[in-house]
Image: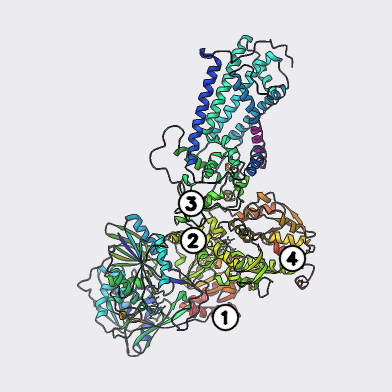
Amino acid sequence: MSATILVPAADPEPASGSPLGIPGPLLHGLLLLVALAAFAWIVRRRLLVLRRGAPDPRLDRLGERLRRLLVIGFGQSRQLRYPVAGIVHVLIFCGFLVLLFRSLTLLGQGFWGGFAIPGFAGPVYAAVKDWTGLVMLGCCAVAAYRRLYVKPARYHDRLALRSHGGEAHVILGLIALLMVADAVFEATTLAAHGGRSWALPLASLAAFALEAVPDSARPGLGVFAFWLHNVALCCFGCYLPVSKHFHVITSLPNVFLGKLDPAGRVKPPRHGLPPGAQPGEIGVRRLADFTWKHLLDFFSCTDCGRCSDVCPAYATGAPLSPRQISVKCRDEAYAAHPVFGRPPAGARPELVGGLIEDRELWACTTCRACEDVCPVTIEYVDKIVDMRRFLVDDGRVPAGMQKALGHLEKKGNPYGKPGKKRGEWVAADGGDCGVRVLAAGASAPLCFFTDSATAFDPRIQRIGRAFGRLLRAAGADCGTLGADEVDSGHEARRVGEEGLFESLREQNLQALAAREVGRVVTTDPHALNALRHDYRLGEPVLHHSELLAELIAAGRLRPFALADGRTYTFHDPCYLGRHNGVYEAPRAVLAAIPGLRTVEMAAARNKSFCCGGGSLYLFREGEGERRMGELRIEQAELAGAQVVVTACPFCLINFEDAIKTTGRTGRIEVVDLAELLERALVTAAPPAATTGA
Amino acid sequence: MKQVLVIAERRGAVLDEGVFELLTAARALAGGGGRVAAAVLGHGIGGLAAELARGFDRVFAFDDERLAEPDGDGDAQALLPLLARGGFDAVLLAHGNLGIDLAPGLSVRAGMPLLADCLELHWAGQSLAGTRAVYGGKVHARVVAAAGGTGAMATVRGGAFAPAGPGTVAGEVVAAALPAEFAPRRRPLRTLRPEAGEVDITQSERLVAVGRGIEDEDGLQLVRGLAAALGADLCASRPVVDKGWLPRSCQVGTSGVTVRPKLYVAVGISGSFQHMGGIKGSPFVVAINKDRAAPIFGVADVGIVGDLSEVVPALEAAIEEQKG
Amino acid sequence: MDIIVCIKRVPDLAEAGLEIAADGRGLRTEDLDFDINEWDDYAVEAAVRLKEQHGGVVTAITVGDEDAEEVLRRALAMGADQAILLDDAAFAGADPFAIATALHACIRSLPFDVVLCGAVTSDGASGQVGGMLAALLDVPQVALATGLEVDGGRARVRHEVEGGLEREVEVALPCLITAQSGLNQPRYVSIRGIRKVADVAIAARSAGDLGLAATAVGEAGSRVRLEGLLLPPAGKRAEILEGSLDAAVATLVERLRERGGL
Ligand SMILES: Cc1cc2nc3c(=O)[nH]c(=O)nc-3n(C[C@H](O)[C@H](O)[C@H](O)COP(=O)(O)OP(=O)(O)OC[C@H]3O[C@@H](n4cnc5c(N)ncnc54)[C@H](O)[C@@H]3O)c2cc1C
Ligand SMILES: Cc1cc2nc3c(=O)[nH]c(=O)nc-3n(C[C@H](O)[C@H](O)[C@H](O)COP(=O)(O)OP(=O)(O)OC[C@H]3O[C@@H](n4cnc5c(N)ncnc54)[C@H](O)[C@@H]3O)c2cc1C
Ligand code: SF4
Ligand code: SF4
């Protein structure tokens, strides 16, 4: 391209002109003042809602918070799980950062012609910025195209009450306008400074388009474009907090203020109460019952739909879409506390039980897939548990769950089995598995906390005994609490029955205190999570996968080859993986079995898909059209596996059932990690040899 | 030699068959020289009284339009003079919905002891005595009416006595008048028939449960026949419900409903923990399964190992034959 | 509206191994868990719903020892306003009539529009107390209610009647209703809910307080005497009926007659 066709002309000088007869800088100052005041006022109105929220300490561990801000916030680490949308979003995000400086420059030029921010004035930045502008414009086009024509399933939510697409179009339009206005402004100066070049594609393009404009009109056009840009910028800034795009402003703070407690630890009913104090009311019923941070979550939701896209309840057709919880609460917050005008007269609709239905809340398995994927670290499990706490206090519990909770209270297990039979599993098949039932006062270096499924479900008892025999083979001395143990209360707590959880926890803590035990181990990730995070147990608490990996590493268990021609895959239980970050130990155990052929499912590790066992789901029929376990078995089959290895009683129950109900018996099998390892220990040697140690 | 009165229950225009079981019990209690009487209440019940008179020595027919609908509260008022007159050593009712509605109040007004829901009745000296199931049927209690010369009442569990055959007694029908102070306190508004499929299995005393072993809907028809023969309601394990062959309200188990029947016949059910978790109250469990090793045989009281397509029809036929 | 609800604490017998106590007249209770009688749960729920609709006071009453306070607290947590424990050694060994006598003596001194009882208990299982109490109070009663609405001095009750039918009837207040399952779905009572009523005072009344002679209540006031309890023999594993199909079926029919109530 050559510059010769462009006749040099004077720079448009917005600062020296006087549009509307007012000196440029003065008018510009006024514009800025009005915009800033409006912005501050709007944001203040919005944030006032947060002041109504419950306390939530979120300013501790600043280093950790900064790190998250850098990685998840600026580093956009969670975006790439969705390649197209993720890349588009990362590009827009980076673009915004780059263009921020350009916008500041343009704002400055409203006062001083030729204003520049040091370091952002040279040709390099000009080129970067111009390319960015081009890409941004492209991204806007892609985004608009996707929204209007492709319509990914994620954007359409079958549970959405109304569409917020209009706001997105306004925002896309404003961004495009900013780009175009800047380009036109640039184009009018280009002529003055050298002409079109590949370094400045967007501006050159604009200059090309403006060739027909007479030279004399250019400075005026430039000034117009300049003002258009700055006015649009101010509108953009003020529109953000009015619309759902408030997230553009709040998402980085939201990431900074994210939950640092272990993922598996449910928030206490109320922060900041002295231990032992009983709050009069618990749970969330109204908007203001949420903590201020949870309210900020609602403002920060980008409505991207990723959470619902990975939610197993949503996937199986249950009446839950986590994203809609945020959207509905944000809409309610906006409606109840409008930026302009007075709050509407009259009572607001019920939040919990109204806008958010009971069945919506009961559909959640607390699997945490939604939280793990959310690019702005919005929390769901704590909120859902908080809302359930209200339902429980109000007596609104589905019948099947009432039954299970009643049994937990009276008998310490959800099945209604007599509590005194709790220790009988150790020898229920006639043989003894090596685990000792510890009387009060007894001691053992290792204490097997079984939890209810292992203690009472005959199929799961087999896992407990297999694990016991493995320990014996490794020469590990292990005891269990027997009839003094009660359910860990993990599900009770997540169902919202905090009082029941507390009483179960006390009983277990007493049972543990009455014995001298070293480490605690469990085959149930729910128990693991309860003991580790809810009880905050002093002693180390291990999952059996961790202990088995440790025994193998120490050479105390030496698996034989198990090459049966089948392909194995490991299913990450939600409470082992996402809630406790244990991904490697079970895989290490599999890797230690010579000849075992393994594959990973597409949804592995933190992307794992819930079996449908959480939150006492075992005790009520969900409202979904399909069962989560069935979907998961299909995923395993898709990966080419014939054996699904898991490490959680509920996963096993659900998968065995799914295999039966979908007619896959004989084609695909589920085993617990302990059962598999035992097979590898006994295939090549008679049991006596392995258990003799 | 005792005088025994049976209060007959009717279902619309027909007698409840339970009255002939009560007749067996009454005859046994009356002994050789004793007499058994029946009381029947309603409007336009001449035919029923005549039918009863073939088996009972005397029939008190309370025929009045105010008695058109059975009403435990009003019927007690109607019957009180008959009982208060004395002379009955025992008054028997079926322990059904009407008996539960009628007997307690009547016994208090008549000043008679009441033995409820008896499986068996006999005399202990001059006192009426019986055995009844308590604690969900896990325990039997032997109870005796206090001696007091007033006679005693008892309600009798359905099926505890074999029904008496068609009688040839040619008993006397006595038209019984309502007492002057008769003033029913209930106003009947309407009678509702539960829709088919609306059966509440949590209330069923007898259940036939079908599992995946039935394989298809034809299998379901087979089992329906058995249930009808047993007078039982149908329920299912989850796979059958999942297939949509029976409504969700029929699913027994930890994630379905909890039932407390007295009899549970499991057909083609393996006996999974989740299914058995919904069965409470220690029923008598019968299992029909082709797999000798199925866990259901670990919890059932009695079982037949065999293919349900053979066992079920044979059993149905045998029961029908038994009923005559 | 004044509503009274009679409730009983009963053992949970599911899965429990039962042992008869040394005196042969009760169960060994050490290993048993107790709870409110299931049908009384429906009765309390119905009472609380009536109060929620019409206002008024719900009073829960039980005849029992101090352990029975537990079910009264539960009723309070569900929404009852006050609770009365009829506790006296003289009440021991009562038959349903003697229980009704004690309840009657207590209730006659209270204002009431509706008395609610369970249809039956899961332990004694006689289904008599409600009907007897109504006769003693001389109020109309409806047994086995599956629906209840109160409006302007009258109760409209749907209840189970002969032949598996249901009938809707109307009675004037005051009246007594016994609750059958299906009447409602009782609300959940959370542990926190129970803790919140831990300090509510529960009135205790003895036979003397009720103006009853010791001979009028308990075993002495009973019209039916319990001679003893016995355990029917229970087989561990299923008896598998062998032989030809016809023979097996014939034996099964016999078993059904003996044990299955055919
Ligand atoms: C979370 C969860 C909750 C559940 N909740 C429930 C619940 O509430 N209720 C429930 O029932 N289940 C429930 N289940 C399912 C339960 O685990 C079992 O899968 C189910 O009960 C098995 O049903 P079934 O016995 O009918 O089928 P199967 O286990 O497949 O048994 C079929 C039986 O029929 C026998 N059979 C086959 N053909 C014949 C023939 N021709 N003649 C005679 N016998 C034959 C077979 O030998 C076998 O024993 C739940 C499962 C999960 C995971
Ligand atoms: C040591 C001992 C001796 C006994 N002796 C006899 C005996 O001699 N004769 C005999 O017949 N039974 C006897 N029983 C059984 C006992 O009397 C019955 O359990 C009691 O009479 C109630 O009857 P039920 O449980 O069948 O109640 P139902 O008539 O089935 O109860 C219906 C409703 O009445 C109300 N109700 C019942 N009991 C109470 C209560 N205690 N407080 C408040 N409301 C109540 C509830 O609303 C209940 O739902 C004895 C029990 C014991 C432990
Ligand atoms: S909660 Fe997070 S993942 Fe879900 S829509 Fe909002 S921003 Fe997206
Ligand atoms: S925790 Fe799991 S089930 Fe619950 S909303 Fe999130 S993704 Fe859905």
Question: Residue A667's x, y, as percent?
Answer: 70, 59
* Residue of label 3: A283
Respond yes or no on whether mark 4 lies under 8 Å from ligand 1: no
The chain letter for the residue carrying disc 3 is: A
* Residue of label 1: C247
Please state the extent of the stretch shown in magenta in the rendering. A80-94
Q: Are marks 3 and 2 on the same chain?
A: yes
| Mark closer to the chain start, 3 or 2 | 3
* Residue of label 2: A402
Q: How much space separates mark 2 and mark 4, taking CA atoms? A: 39 Å
* Residue of label 4: A679
Between residues A558 and A569, which one lies in front from this camera angle?
Answer: A558
SS for callout 2: helix
The chain letter for the residue carrying disc 4 is: A
User: Do the residues bearing badges 2 and 4 touch, measured as CB atoms within 8 Å?
Assistant: no
**Circle number at residue C103:** none
User: Do the residues bearing badges 3 and 2 touch, measured as CB atoms within 8 Å?
Assistant: no
| Mark closer to the chain start, 3 or 4 | 3
SS for callout 4: helix
SS for callout 1: helix
Badge 1 amino acid: Ala
Badge 4 amino acid: Arg
Q: Are marks 1 and 4 on the same chain?
A: no
